Amino acid sequence: MLNTSLTTDSVAIDLQPIVSKIINEERINQEEGLLLYNQASIPLLGSLANAIREKKNGNNTFFNKNIHIEPTNICVFDCKFCSYSRKLSKKVEAWEYTIDEMIEKLKTYKEKDITEVHLVGGVHPKMGLHYFIELIKKIKKIRPDIHIKAFTAVELEYMCRKAKVTYEEGLKMLKNAGQDSLPGGGAEIFDEDIRNEICADKCNSETWLEIHETAHKLKMPSNATMLYGHIEKPIHIIDHLDRLRQLQDKTCGFNTFIPLKYRNGNNQMSHINEGSLVNDIKLYAFARIYLDNFKHLKAYWPMIGKKTTQNLLAFGVDDIDGTIDDTTKIYSMAGVEDQNPTMSTEEIIKLVKDVGRTPIQRDTLYNTIREY
């Protein structure tokens, strides 16, 4: 049973059976989840989420030392929410790095104790499966010890389709080259009606889930994400989380869940206001409650902000990503406050300790490297 400070007086009568199930560590269904999401107060959600967080991970808050390499922001797809991508024919604010340029970037970190390279970018029509196999092999040659987390399901669907291989064949080729895991990007919202409005031309939700399931079968773990705070409704959030929970039941292959807040700067959906801090807290806390088979919930601080990340450590979050010692542009181009998303180890440790949590440096698979 979860240890919470809730009293019956603090719980609405129609929520009491649902809250009792959660406290007794019983799974809630979609209907119960929707009722909880729509009617529960923030203090109630926070108390439940924090109890689950501490049951699963104690007081620990995880981070890793990583860098992001973004090969290109040129992309064949037209996602309405994206501020990052550029078309091949319109190269203003566009970049496309060669393999040698990316390897030179990695070499500048040769003497630093980073444990992960995060390799994600736009879907470039000329950067295919064999191109990235060559890149991965060269990365491993320089840093054989480093974990390579690479390519969203959207990138993988395109490169496998262009190479005329199955997802399993393509993933096996990448794994044999040295790729270790997948990030969670490209999930957006699984509901196809919403997806058709915001990202109609990229791979659908079933394909995203199929690629991650295939990776898990090949012993390649992955992360899961959801883009929230745009045109989705609570029912779409519940559906998205439920599909992730079902796949995790089947494969146990997801390392963590990462909610990604929609940012409205410089994109085709800029007329939509961004969600409030209260909405952020509600979403994170609810995700921690509903995803009962996910051990970790991550707040990606370059997207959500350092202060909000700190607050979320009381609402179910136990991971804040990493030092990200580079020039990640996916969210800076969408207008987030921090245009230079870099934090030193010392800054991360202080951020965590200032709210009474214990900083734990981890590797990609959540093995402890050092406790601070």
Image: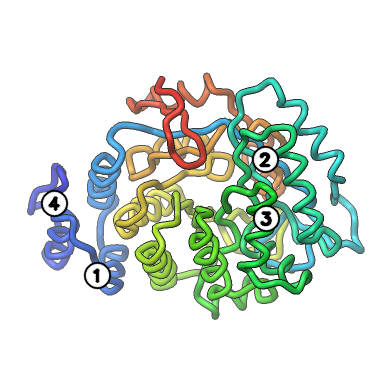
Give whichever of 47, 99 is nearer the camera. 99
**Is the Cβ of the residue at disc 2 closer than 8 Å to that at disc 3?**
no
Going by the image, does 142 lie left or right of 282?
A: right
Q: Residue furthest left?
A: 8
CA–CA distance between discs 2 and 4?
44 Å
**Crowd around label 3: few <14 · some 14–19 · many ≥20 (10 Å):** many
| Marking on residue 356 | none
Give whichever of 160, 56 is nearer the camera. 160
SS label for mark 4: helix
Q: Residue furthest bottom?
A: 193
SS label for mark 2: strand
SS label for mark 1: helix
Residue 67: image quadrant is top right
Q: Earlier in the sequence, mark 4 or mark 3?
A: 4
**Mark 3: which amino acid?**
Leu
| Marking on residue 68 | 2
Going by the image, does 269 lie left or right of 205?
A: right
Q: Earlier in the sequence, mark 2 or mark 1?
A: 1
Residue under numbered circle 1 = 32
